[in-house]
Amino acid sequence: MPVSTSPLGQPIWRRRTTRAQWLQYLAWLAGGSLFLLCWKLISDNTMWVFVEDAGRQGADLISRMTPPEWGYANVLWKPMWDTLNIATLGTALGIIMAFPVAFLAARNTTPHPLIRSAALVVIVSSRSINSLIWAMLLVTILGPGVLAGIIAIALRSIGFVGKLLYEAIEEIHPTPVEAISATGASRMQVMNYGVLPQVMPAFAGISVYRWDINIRESTVLGLVGAGGIGLQLNASINSLAWDQVSVIFVMIFATVLVSEGISARVRHAII
Amino acid sequence: MSEQAEMLAARQQAAHRGEWQRLPLIESPRLRWGIVFGVLVYLVLALASVEVDWERVAEGAGRAVNFLGAFMQPDFVSRYDDIVAGLLESLTMTLTSTVIGVLLAIPVGLGGARNIAPLPIYTACRAIIAVSRTFQEVIIAILFVVMFGFGPFAGMITLAFATIGFMAKLLAEDIEDLDWRQVEAVRATGASWWQTMNHAIQPQVMPRLIGLSMYRLDINFRESSVIGIVGAGGIGATLNTSLSRYEYDTSAAILLVIIAIVLLCEYSSSHVRRWTQ
């Protein structure tokens, strides 16, 4: 604790030394300036006339969105089913691919450090590219449709599931593994009886969690042509049918809430 | 109890005979087979409704090869100015939106914690969190682009809004399971509401709050690369343009830059988190 002395010779307690205090001021100053600089860059690229208009535009938007055209919901069941399929099949495909990758990436189960780095590269590149970008790429390659959406979701899920699973594998108890290897079990048997039972609950939990996120993400994939309710959303926005857009929003909101509830209950039951 | 003991004995005997099998993950056989059956039925229904145009896929295979080729030789140079401008916009959007979002998320998070907020405030804050978390950033971006016009300002507001939901939810959960004895101790000294917040609650949640803000910075950058698709500025717009012009080598360059920055963000944020905890 830094203590300085007052002119009368009494010790005064302070929280920081003078140096630390100044350094802190300096850090705040640097952070603040950086923020202002960024703000300036944004404000230079903004048409402020449009921003001033925002209140009126917002009110206009709301007046166009209400009342929702509920009859439109009948058209939406098929796209919604497609969206659910994109999310579910995409998650399934993703976890099938993520499973081996995670075992290759975990420090304690990887066959070789080089393979581990390769697996980590796969995980990182899958994680850093958003599913919408994957969808854009796949739509140019595979053509528009549900298939591109499924693969986009799968590719994005590899990184997420792989990362969380390999962290879970690295945190397992080493004792069961040692016990199994002491019986003379082969490498695969050690994996099967020593490692797998320990990570299975975590794996199930992560998969359900990712499924829930994927439902949310698959609602927008249609904006770039990858199928699902996003296609309908795009069409309604392009034709300025805002009363249909609000029906779609309500449906997305309800679906996401339900899927979140299911995922929370399943994870609660497992863990 | 005796049933369990019987089962254990039976399993031991099976093990002696070399017929041991491990226990299934789900205990009740009816539920287990029910789930298997349900999954099979769903798979059949779902796969039947997926329409694939195989001719189009075969046609696209050539493009896939082109694209992979482009990844081998990314072209940073010919659209250098566009890439730099897009990146700068994305990065500034990321920083400002995270700062604004976190600042706004703190009051919402305090209001969303049941143990310190009264019921009406709690309900209102939880509603904000639910709305902000349910909708994808891209959907919110569409609305804000309509309201605020094209450009990074709409993107910044979008990301800030998404940040509020994310941060406020985690902060509220954190406050809900903090150590209540410290709050009581501070209250017992006659501290006011502000003093309780500042001396009992803030020190307990601060390290995690900083860690989560760094994590959100990372997410915001990743999201800022897609909201450009709907006109909210940033590198996403550049990427979208390059893809629609079939300039795959430029798109590959942009994707590589995004991956590199995300890696850098993740690396530094893990450092910051280790340093604060």
Image (cartoon, rainbow, N blue to C red):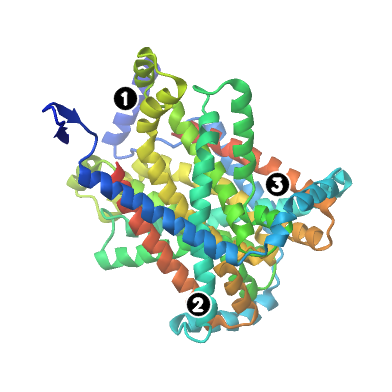
Give above or below for A129 relative to A250.
below
Give the residue displayed 64% in from the left and 58% down from the top: B154
**Is circle 2 on the same chain as circle 3?**
no
Q: Is residue A233 left or right of residue A41?
A: right
Give above or below for B95 relative to B243.
above
Q: Give neighbour class at mark 2: few <14, some 14-19, many 20+ (Cα, 10 Å).
A: many
The residue wearing badge 1 is: B9
The residue wearing badge 3 is: A252
Sooner in the amino-acid sequence: mark 2 or mark 1: 1
The residue wearing badge 2 is: B252
Q: Which quadrant holds the C terminus of chain B?
A: top left
In three-dimensional space, the C-alpha distance between marks 2 and 1, rounded to whole angstroms, equals 62 Å
Q: Give neighbour class at mark 3: few <14, some 14-19, many 20+ (Cα, 10 Å).
A: many
Give the residue displayed 44% in from the left and 82% down from the top: B72
Rendered location of residue B164, percent (x, y)? 55, 43
Labelled pair 1, 3 in contact (Cβ < 8 Å): no
